[in-house]
Image (tube, grey):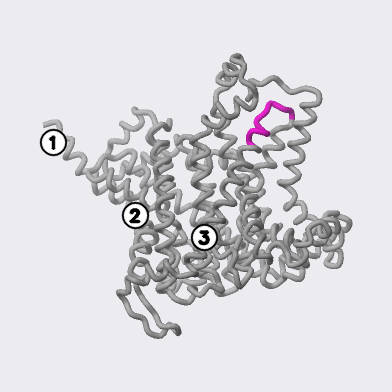
Amino acid sequence: MESRAFDRRRWRQLPVALGLLAPSAIILGAFIVYPIVKSVFLGTERCNASGTRCVEGGWDQYTDTFRSTEFQHALWVTAKFALITVPLGLALGIGLAVLAHKHLAGVSVFRAIFSSTVATSVAVASLMWLFLLQPSVGVLSNVGWIADAFPVVKQPGLLNDPDTALWSVGLSSVWANLGFTFIIITAGLQGIPDDVYEAAALDGAGGSRRFWAITLPLLGPSLLFVLIVLTSRAFQAYGEIDLLTEGGPRPDDSTTTITYLTYGRNSIMATDLGLQATTAVLLFVVLLGLSFLQLWSLGRRVHYGD
Amino acid sequence: MAAERRPTGFRLVGRYGLLAFVAFVTLFPIYTTLVAAFKPGDKVLVNPLVPDSFTLEPLMTAWSDGHLGRYLFNSFVVAAVVTIAQVVTSLLSGYAFAMLDFPGRHVLFALFLATLLVPIEATLVVNRRTVDTLGWLNTYQGLALPFLATAFGTFLVRQALLAVPGELRDAARIDGAGHLAFLRYVALPVIVPTVGALALFSFLSSWNQYLWPNLITTEESMNTVQSGLTLLRRSSLDEPNALMAGTVIAAVPIFAALLIFQRSLVRGLTSGAVKG
């Protein structure tokens, strides 16, 4: 009897619940679920070079695109970009957080400084770095001793040299993300109780041993979160590339990542909806594994969260 | 680390030295930007590290020729609409998932979370088409529409409500119109910190959107600050001081807002990281 009454109440709450969920569900459905489903089909539309005649049902467009030199190159550039930005961003974030996690007078000023780049949007950060790195009208090339010591900053310029362009964009990206990384890892450090360190010190563990044996493992969840966010940001990087290099220098396309290949203003995809949809779906698939990791770590927090 | 003995003497000097050096490197791009933004055009590339002259001219140029006032206004309107909408939709759906028991709740919640798996860049091709079909290119509606709801916000609100004491939640077991009143007068006051963090996070992510406004804006007057900076970069490359002044103008509102709402920000960012 009781369970039936309970059931009845659950069913009675259904209309109210659906009403409350409707606004979110409609937006998420129309602008996240529908686009993905629709893209999968749009991606089969093959058009001729001028885009005047398109045929549907060309599923082989996915394999063709994936195997194309352009996509393979962009995938490789994206992977390199992630390999540059993620470890560097993570290491710098840990370093800064540990450095500023001391009971020193005035340390809060340094914390504010290290967090400050969180206030810069990708456009703001990229333009700041553009001005630093530009060969003719930039800062570094107009400081005499720097231009003398590193001729590359003037000719051809760090952003125009195929060997340094991706690193330069990566550096600007690392800088822009540093505030975020610092804040997350600092919060993680503050969650480690003091007595763990006291006990370790009593047992005679030195500074570096305490770092490797206590700090790093106990930072685990924060580091995992930062790792996932930085990696997915690397795969989705667009603004810094658009403003700093426009995917170039050409003809190597040294900084054309998957996202830039899909949306970049000079990209061969930009005018072909079917091809755009294809790379968008492939980007989704590539990022899916990463996103699952993210969701999994979110799920862990549901479990352990207070 | 807190338990460590305070460093003294050389070690103390060394630590401050290291902190100061790292702070200098971190602030360097901001410093050179500020120096350039206040230098006249003929001096900006001479000693770019030294603030040896001062003028407000680049700021005026960027403001008038770069239309940054208009773009700031556009960004503000869009971000405000997105923030209010995200807070409201997240409160409603978060409440439903936390406080109501109904058939299919777990499946629906899983579906909501699954939308977090989709990178925004993978949706924009079709979303641009949708907004185009609606005739909303170059409009505030178009800029805001795809971002009026968020599964992340729903998740945050749900987690905060689940932490609300049981007696309060039992009071929620009322029917019909009672729910909205309960949400407004009982639940909302308890989760104000979470909602504040969500609002700040929503505002920031909308304000910082780069690709979307660049994709759907073709009329100059409908740019946001971010896509406006793209235009400025393409137009004033030979005037680095005006470009940097524009960058300063674009950055100041967020720096100011974050100074005021520091605590909310840290809470908002870490709620995704450390604890629910």
* Front residue of this view, candidates B24 and A275: A275
Does the stretch in magenta take in A102? yes
Splitting the image into 4 quarters, where does residue A52 fall?
bottom left
Mark 3 in CB contact with mark 1 (< 8 angstroms): no
Same chain shared by disc 2 and disc 3: yes
Q: Position of residue B146 (x, y in %)?
A: 44, 61
Q: Residue at x 75, y 50 (%)?
A: B28
Disc 3: host chain: A
Query: What kind of secondary structure does the magenta stretch mostly adopt?
Result: loop
Q: Residue at x 73, y 42 (%)?
A: B23
If you read the primary sequence from the N terminus, does the residue marked by circle 2 or circle 3 appear first? 2
Q: Position of residue B224 (x, y in %)?
A: 58, 64
Amino acid type for the residue under numbered disc 2: Ala
Does the stretch in magenta take in A183? no
Please name the residue that numbered disc 1 is placed on. A4
Marks 2 and 3 sit apart, C-alpha to C-alpha, by 36 Å
Instruction: State which region is magenta.
Output: A97-105
Left or right: A52 as drawn, with respect to B50: left
Q: Residue at x 66, y 21 (%)?
A: B4
If you read the primary sequence from the N terminus, does the residue marked by circle 1 or circle 2 appear first? 1
Please name the residue that numbered disc 2 is placed on. A25
Marks 3 and 1 sit apart, C-alpha to C-alpha, by 59 Å
- The quadrant of the rendering that contains the N terminus of chain A is top left
Q: Is residue B185 above or below residue B137?
A: above
Please name the residue that numbered disc 3 is placed on. A76
